Amino acid sequence: MKFQILLASLFSQMKTRQWWLTMLFWIALSLPAQATVIIRVAIERDVNQVKVGSSTPAAIKDGSGRTLGQLPAMGSYFAQAIPGSGVALDKWRSGLFWIEPTGKGHVYINDRWYRGRTLVLPTTKGVTAVNWVNLEEYLYSVVGGEMSSSWPQAALKAQAIAARTYALYERQRQRNNPVFDLGDSPDRWQIYKGVNSESRATYNAVDATAGQVLTFNNQIILSVFHACSGGHTENVEDVWSGRRLPYLRGVPDYDMNVSECNNWTRTFSSGELSQRFPGIGNVKDIKLESFSPFRSVTTLRIIGDKGSKVLRGEEVRTALKLRSTRFIINRAGGNFVLQGRGFGHGLGMSQWGAQQLALRGANHLQILGYYFRGVALTPIKSK
């Protein structure tokens, strides 16, 4: 049987402290059994060697599932590639290795503990270590890595659903990747620190929303999020050109007064910019050429004495290593001073905005319905 909640949330103008939430729920008869999903997270990629271990005695297996030996509890070894023949792990040699803890043990990869098991395999540039972990247990860590565990449960629950949806979106997008679904770095994926970022609050948020994802037209959405927007989120096509998505639309935000991620300053000297963009010679000026409807910079031109460099969309932020694209430029003593608000790409859910809405009494469904327009809350279905 299908179970679906259609989210629709409308907030009033932000000129006063009053605000209203409306929710439309469509609930069918029953929820199917939750599917068990394994996520493959690349912890180390293409490195010369990686240290692996286990908190309990762990079986060491080869690619066929044959047990080669046992890794002692709290022991660790360096795995490294053997050119043309696989991986070496202490006295063992194999095309690849599985490390599977006994009982409720955790695996160790370099400097962190993780749930699940570890796959170590050779790549063209060395070895890669992948953590195979249950999706819900993966989220115990991600929620705590992305948000403070001290935040209201409504915000943590919204984060859990958004992170679960994003993980499955990436898993689907990477379906032809034989090695991994996701990495663990925030610049490209979600923050995943293993058991170190788990807490009772993250367990509660994940368990309370277990198996729930966001969909649009029965498809899992790209449920991106960021620290804070600086007052207004963005339409996706203004950040990632050519990718207009009906559920990623700019909305007024509630993170304007959050000091932790607003009012930043970044100063560049002409020489620093000239080194960063060597093809244009000595930098003479920076021009803000176009803006989004909500006043984020969408086109920036850096002008040198030998040419110019144009940055567009998200490239404005990443190429200059800025907190956001919502900024102005002033000149000071020959330097370019960028003053801005916000932290992140500005798409989807503002995490600080979610926290502020939760403090005002919004629940997690209202938060998600506000930042992701026209989506439905749908269970992961058994197969």
Image (cartoon, rainbow, N blue to C red):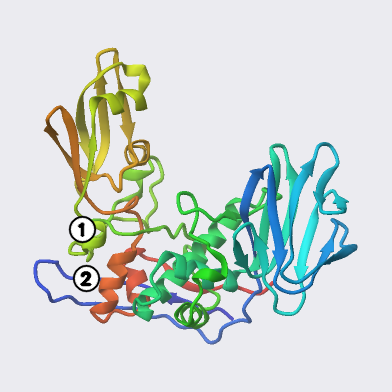
User: Where's residue 19, x and y in %?
Assistant: 17, 75
Q: Give the residue displayed 26% in from the left and 78% down from the top.
A: 359
Instruction: Report if residue 109 is visible in the image.
Output: yes
Where does label 1 land, which residue?
231
Picture quadrant of residue 194: bottom right
Left or right of 187 in this view: 53: right
Where does label 2 land, which residue?
11
Element type at marker 1?
loop
Disc marking residue 39: none
Vertical comparison of 324 with 84: above or below:
below
User: Where's residue 330, x and y in %?
Assistant: 13, 36
Q: Amino acid at mark 2?
A: Phe
Q: Mark 2 Cα within 10 Å, few/some/many (few <14, many 20+)? A: some
Could you say which is closer to the camera, residue 354 or residue 87? Answer: 87
Q: Amino acid at mark 1?
A: Gly
User: In this rendering, which labeled residue sits more in front, label 1 or label 2?
Assistant: 1
> In what quadrant of the picture does the N terminus appear?
bottom right
Farthest-out residue, bottom: 29
User: Where's residue 102, x and y in %?
Assistant: 77, 75
Q: Mark 1 Cα within 10 Å, few/some/many (few <14, many 20+)? A: many
> In what quadrant of the picture does the C terminus appear?
bottom right
Vertical comparison of 221 with 127: above or below:
below
User: Where's residue 262, x and y in %?
Assistant: 22, 56
Tell me whether the residue at label 1 lies in contact with that at label 2, contact meaning CB atoms closer than 8 angstroms. no
Number of numbered markers: 2
Left or right of 101 in this view: 316: left
Element type at marker 2?
loop
Vertical comparison of 359 with 216: above or below:
below
Residues at marks 1 and 2, CA–CA distance in whole angstroms: 14 Å
Left or right of 112 in this view: 256: left
> Which sits earlier in the primary sequence, circle 1 or circle 2?
2
Farthest-out residue, left: 16
